[in-house]
Amino acid sequence: MSDSTADSTTGTATGSTTGKLSLPSLTAMVVGSMVGAGIFNLPGRFATATGPFGAIIAWLIAGTGMYMLARVFQALAEKRPDIDSGVFAYAKAGFGDYMGFLSAFGYWLGSCLGNVFYWVLIGSTLGFFFPDLFGDGSTIIAIVVSLVGIWSFHFMILRGVEQATFVNSVVTVAKIVPLIVAILAFVFFFNYSQFAENFFGGVDMPEKTLVAQVRDTMLITVFVFLGIEGASVYSRFAKTRADVGKATILGFVGVTGLMVAVTLLPYATAPRAAIAGVQNPSLAGALELVVGHWGAVLISIGVLISVLGAYLAWSLICAEVLFAAARSSDMPKLFAAQNANRVPANALWLTNIVVSLFVISTYWSRDAFNFMLDMTSVTALLPYLLVAGYGILLARSGVGYETTPEQRGRDHVFAWIAAIYTLIMFVAAGLKYVLLVAVLFVPGTILYFWARREQNARIFTPAELIVFAVTLIAGGVGLYGLLTGIITP
């Protein structure tokens, strides 16, 4: 999961104190917003699914799709600067109140699940040092440690403690340095014959088509790109407006290169099956295969500092998503309340109660680590799809393009590609995850009813009623699957 919110907090502060940012500063912010904990888990997740050939195809698809989505966010920020309540506001502007709510709820839920993933990652990383106690991050000890951490951060934030700039700097170094060390080690020990042997999967590759191999990698690619919408946040701080587009491209290409290297280079140092079998975070295990135990220790320490450093800001942003939605009347007014320290306290309480329940639920998951990663990715897809859809509607209408009519056709194409890519990701996720997200959306709609009653507003339009009916049916099927064991988390 990217740490966009952690870094955007710093970006805002920087913008307010120094006024304008240069191209290198903007590019650094884009890089900081995209490099997160997910990158440390690429080698094992890809090696489980495919060899280098399938991985290259997957990155070409993901890179193209996410780049188009980034361009849609950039275009919307330029053409509709009046919409600033959050990603969900684009869904509301284009598709009405209920879709705006589902987008806000999905974005908040994805942020919560991302925080659960952080704690499972912390537990599995500690499992490197204390395997009997922490295991894969879902043991009783790991869950207890996670709950203590969640509520310690909760009460710190309630007192108004925010992530300081120097902490963000430490976090960025902690993320980048181990990655560079790992890449240099993989380059040094590069074995062409090993890479060639792994190219189409190599020894013990499960029998499945190339399409199935690529599909099995797609959710991790969505996950590591989460937060790409943060790139457009910094536009108003740019010395030159054109630098925003350049910084987006430079940052995107740089980070994508980093992720592709972390994915592909391990294939040249060990058999695919060996990489697939390492414990998460898999980059630690993959480096250990090459340089020994110190490599795993280095990556593990980097992961722990990175995740703990970023978690404070992510906890706050989860609450702020609810807070922003409540202020724009998409959530109950209760969540628009702030305490004396200007922290959205009610939103924070609900967020951490939900995160705690999900952390406890990992005890019954067969693979809590990848399950939380996939659920986080799928919940992000609906807000992204609605943003791409609004990009299509806006380019078609011509609103905002009065002075730049020549950009309409280009932006229209970008938005369509982004929408098609997001739909493909839903298909790649599989029916299981779509149904499980629906299970969570159905009770979440209670918050929508609550907010509409507060405003004495009509609950659903006819079209929204159909959307709710489909969500209700999907949630019912998902719940039945969970209760009967047909669907297992």
Image (cartoon, grey):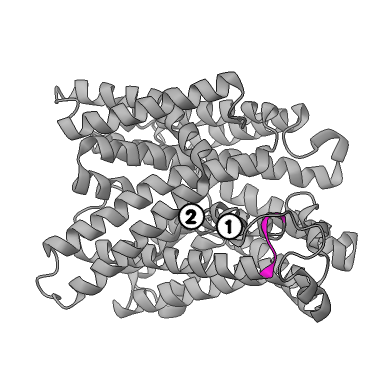
Q: Residues within 10 Å of mark 1 (few under 14, many from 20)?
A: many
Q: Residues within 10 Å of mark 2 (few under 14, many from 20)?
A: many
**Quick check: can you spot residue 126?**
yes
Quadrant hosting residue 393: bottom left
Which range of residues does the magenta coloring cover? 48-52
1 and 2 marks in contact (CB < 8 Å): yes
Picture coordinates of residue 262, whole percent (x, y) = 68, 67
User: Where 115 sits versus 355, above or below?
Assistant: below
The residue where tag 2 is placed is 226
Disc 1 from disc 2: Cα separation: 9 Å
What residue is shown with label 1? 36
- Residue 86: image location, x then y, percent: 32, 48
Where the C terminus falls, by quadrant? Answer: top right
Q: Secondary structure at mark 2?
A: loop
Kind of residue indicated by mark 2: Leu
Residue 338 location (% of width, % of height)? 36, 32
**SS class, disc 1:** loop
